[in-house]
Image: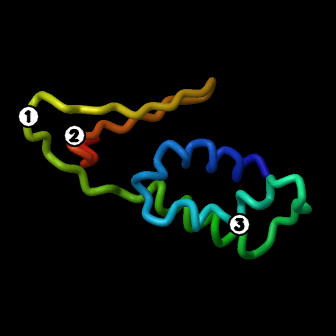
Amino acid sequence: MSRSVKLLRHGWLYKRFVEGFSELALPITKLFQKSNKFEWTRECEDSFQALKRRLVSATILAIPEGNEGFIIYSDTSKKGLGCVLMEKGIVIA
């Protein structure tokens, strides 16, 4: 269970960069609803593996066009830091 929680926590920061993130994460998200029994199914495992593949695969980065209009998205925890640098809606780093 802890690896799925960690994946979802870190994944929410990057969901805008993973097409279909919410749909992929749905089987795991349902596990944490009070009305559902926690049962790790094959569908949950497939969802977890697909999300993990998409989150660790290399993204094609763009070359910055100037020195204005940059946005930094960041997330921190006691164990790490994640950041994404964007310019005009395009991932730079």
**Residue drawn at the location 48% of the way across and 55% of the way down:** 55
State which tag comes first along the sequence, 3 or 1. 3
Vertical position of residue 82 compared to residue 40: above or below: above
Q: Amino acid at mark 3?
A: Pro
Quadrant position of residue 72:
top left
Locate residue 56, reporting x and y percent.
46, 55
Q: In the image, is 11 to the left or to the right of 85?
A: right
Q: Amino acid at mark 2?
A: Glu
- State the separation of the CA atoms marked 2 and 1: 9 Å
Camera-side residue: 15 or 53?
15
**Residue drawn at the location 57% of the way across and 60% of the way down:** 22
Secondary structure at numbered mark 1: loop
Quadrant position of residue 36:
bottom right
The crowd level at tag 3 (other Cα within 10 Å; few <14, some 14-19, many 20+) is: some
Q: Amino acid at mark 1?
A: Gly
**Residue drawn at the location 62% of the way across and 43% of the way down:** 9
Locate residue 59, reporting x and y percent.
32, 56
Q: Which residue is mark 1?
A: 66
The crowd level at tag 2 (other Cα within 10 Å; few <14, some 14-19, many 20+) is: some
The crowd level at tag 1 (other Cα within 10 Å; few <14, some 14-19, many 20+) is: few
State which tag comes first along the sequence, 3 or 2. 3
Secondary structure at numbered mark 3: helix
Q: In the image, is 71 to the left or to the right of 66?
A: right
Mark on residue 87?
A: 2
Secondary structure at numbered mark 2: strand
State which tag comes first along the sequence, 2 or 1. 1
- State the separation of the CA atoms marked 3 and 2: 33 Å
Check the image and name the residue furthest to the top. 78
Q: Which residue is mark 3?
A: 27
Q: How is the image coloured?
A: rainbow
